[in-house]
Image: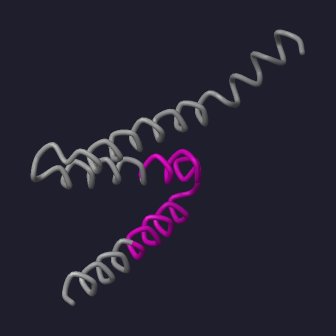
Amino acid sequence: MTSEDRRLLWHHMRLPTISFAALLGLLAINVTLGATTPFRWAWMIEAGVTLCMVLVVLLVSMEVWRDTPLIRVFSMLGFFWVLIMFSMTLTDYLGR
């Protein structure tokens, strides 16, 4: 593999590598907060970290930031629908 091939490979793999490292770091924060529960309202930080993870997956892995505005709207609506379904399921479990 020549140096030009390595440079081209790094150019194409830089953003996925950075996003993967960011997702691993955010996962480590979530697991640490979930396992230790350092304070009572740690779930708020966990929810924020989870939101950051969703945004990284949505914008980088799904490459929504490169798509047309119509695709962006429908992908955001899809994630909003998943949020509604998740909150309805959580409400059902907590209400029993």
Q: Is residue 11 above or below residue 61?
A: above
Q: Where is residue 14, by image quadrant?
A: top right
Q: Quadrant of the C terminus?
A: bottom left
Residue 41's x, y, as percent? 11, 52
The x, y position of residue 53, in whole percent, is 41, 49
Instruction: Please give left or right for residue 53 compared with residue 75 in the image.
Output: left
Please report the bounds of the magenta region as a residue range.
55-82
- Above or below, 29 against 2 in this view is below
- In the image, 21 versus 66, the foreground residue is 21
Residue 90 picture quarter? bottom left
Locate the N terminus and report the quarter of the image it occupies: top right
Q: Is residue 79 above or below residue 92?
A: above
Question: Residue furthest toward the front?
Answer: 36
Residue 80: in magenta span: yes
Q: Looking at the image, which residue is at 33% across and 82% down?
A: 89
Residue 82, x across and y down, in percent = 42, 73
Q: Give the residue drawn at x 61%, y 36%.
A: 16
Name above or below for residue 35 compared with residue 20.
Answer: below
48 lies left or right of 59: left
